[in-house]
Image (cartoon, rainbow, N blue to C red):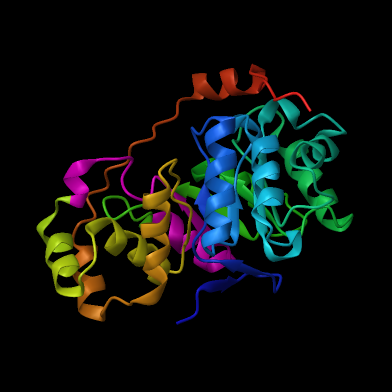
Amino acid sequence: MKNTLTLNNGVECPALGIGTFMLSPADAENSVREALKMGYRLVDTAAAYQNERACGRGIRASGVPREDVFLSTKLWPSEYTNPRAVDETLERLGTDYVDLLYIHQPAGDWLAGYRRLEKALRDGKARSIGISNFKGRYLEELAAKWETVPQFMQAEAHPYFTQRELRRTLDRLDIRLMSWYPLGHGDKALLREPVLADIAARLGRTPAQVVLRWHVQMGFSVIPGSRNVDHIRDNLAVLDFALTDADMAAIATLDKGVRYYHRTDEQLVQFAAWQPTYEKA
């Protein structure tokens, strides 16, 4: 089974990674270090998570060569007009390039932010670029103005919310989806669904492993985050089994159009003004 995705620029990205959203610097460093030791090769962070330095430390402490790690991060809207934003990001991470660089929200001067990504790509400071939380008119407007098609869209996705409409657009543009809230933002109702329980029992897996395997077979890159090393290890085990076509069809019936993240225009204004607080070097 292939456990990587080929992006529209030929770069290979792991299908499964470790996410660091809502992890403290200490937890992020520990989770990244231990995940890489186990065999993970994708690490996702962001300026807004305020743990980029910790992720960099975790990568170095793991003993895994930097070139073997697919490192993903995101510029925050307050950084979009900062000409040194990319260099400052690299400095926090302790690297001279990232494998994937996003703009995090369609807030502030997001087109300037995207131009910064395109320049980072040309300059070799990013191997691929992406957009996070873009949809509807924001995606349409950006698509009319970009010089380089992004390689990734990062968005909420799980069996309760499969992003059918967005995926049609992404498929047309040859953009991959990286899914967050992959287990329904901790909604126990999802993991208790009889469909998932039955599949898990037949395969000798957990419902969470079944859901993460569903993401992989949907063609997504998925980045579950955890501070629990046992959970991180369990998540990695989704790469050594497969769901049948019948399993995938059964899981498809769970799509309720239920999402857990709701953003308002007022929040976008707040995002543009907020400045992350970074760890000191």
Residue 10 occupies which quadrant of the picture? bottom right
Q: Position of residue 48 (x, y in %)?
A: 61, 30
User: With respect to residue 139, does 168 lie above or below?
Assistant: below
* Quadrant of the frame with the C terminus: top right
**In which quarter of the view is residue 122 placed?**
bottom right
Nearest the viewer among 177 and 17 is 17
Residue 250: % across, % down: 18, 68
In this rendering, the answer to whether 185 lies above or below 221 is above
Quadrant containing the N terminus is bottom left
Q: Which residues are magenta?
A: 165-191
Residue 185 image offset from top left, x and y in percent = 33, 40
In the image, taking residue 269 as reference, residue 243 lies left or right, namely: left
Q: Position of residue 181 (x, y in %)?
A: 39, 45
Residue in the foreground of this view, choosing between 160 and 3: 3
Query: Magenta stretch containing residue 214, yes or no?
Result: no
Q: Residue at x 52, y 36 (%)?
A: 27
Residue drawn 30% across and 61% down? 209
189 sits left or right of 173 in the view: left
Locate residue 7 relative to residue 214 in the image: left or right. Answer: right
Residue that appears at 59% across and 62% down: 41
Task: Using the rendered image of the protein, determine whether residue 140 is visible from the camera's viewpoint.
Answer: no
**Front position in the image: 183 or 176:** 183
